[in-house]
Image (cartoon, rainbow, N blue to C red):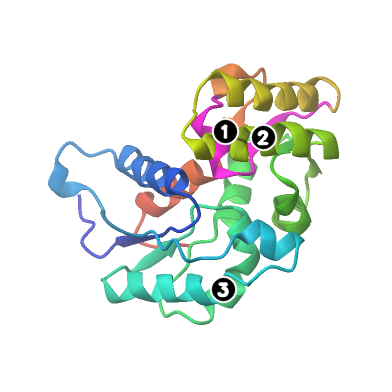
Amino acid sequence: MENNERIIGILGGMGPEATASFFYKVIKETHVSKDQDHFRTIIDSNPKIPDRTAAILNNGPSPVEEMVMTAKNLQAAGATVAVMPCVTAHYFYEAIQKEIDIPLHHVLKGLNSYIDEEYPDVKKIGVLSTSATKETGLFQQYLKDKEIVYPNAFEQEKKVMQAIYGDNGIKQGNTGQEPKQLLLEVAERLIDEEQCELIVGGCTEVELVLKSKDLTVPFIDPMRVAAKDLTKSETSE
């Protein structure tokens, strides 16, 4: 396998679980038999990047400066393409891309292409996300011909947020039954009551506990699609 020109830089600082999970997805999607044939992957997990949710919802500090610095560090270390393992962070995509010299892979564009190819008849998609991801409008922007349905306000606050950020949530290292059940309840309502034909993980942490086998409709992890895109060819877009 010839892959010497591709060095994937993972722009971390958006949760160690998301960063580690994306790295593992890249490994799984490479499909090689020798360690030497895997894509070289560089990670900069900058803990100083301000919270994207606070920036979007509460006028908190912008994460752009630190994200650009992190991307430049990846470039200086030899990365030929960068990727952000966080859907919400793509709200700042244009501001970051114009400041760096290597391509920044656009996860939402890749997701749109994947759904069009694999599920061309799907028209209604449920997105398991927090309110910050909803407020960005990213899914509506890049999945334009689909009807996007989000959890209601109660579900976002009491179930999705609790599953991810709660005292017993995924970000606390709990990938067991409690956060899974909360997310499953939301997904099942989106399927049964909203008639969603596809469920997408709007936050990277969702895929850490929820799997396709848990649902009666397909479940798509945008970061797994991104890993496929980044390892299938020598072009990043």
| Amino acid type of the residue that numbered disc 3 sits on in the rendered structure | Val
**Residue 68, horizontal then vertical, whole percent:** 48, 75
Asked if residue 139 can be seen in this view, the reply is no
| Amino acid type of the residue that numbered disc 1 sits on in the rendered structure | Gly
Residue for badge 2:
162
Query: Residue at point 60% right, 30% down?
Result: 219
Please tell me whether residue 167 is drawn above or below residue 80 in the rendered image: above
Residue 221 vs residue 175, the one in the foreground: 175
Asked whether the beta carbons under mark 1 and mark 2 sit within 8 Å of each other, the answer is yes
**Residue 193, horizontal then vertical, whole percent:** 86, 23
Left or right: 234, with 109 as reference point: left
Crowding around mark 3 (Cα neighbors within 10 Å: few <14, some 14 to 19, many 20+) is: some
Query: What stretch of residues is rendered in magenta?
Result: 195-211
Tell me which numbered mark, 1 or 2, is placed earlier along the sequence. Answer: 2
Crowding around mark 1 (Cα neighbors within 10 Å: few <14, some 14 to 19, many 20+) is: many
Give the distance between the C-alpha atoms of the residues marked 3 and 1, in whole angstroms: 27 Å
Left or right: 225, with 80 as reference point: right
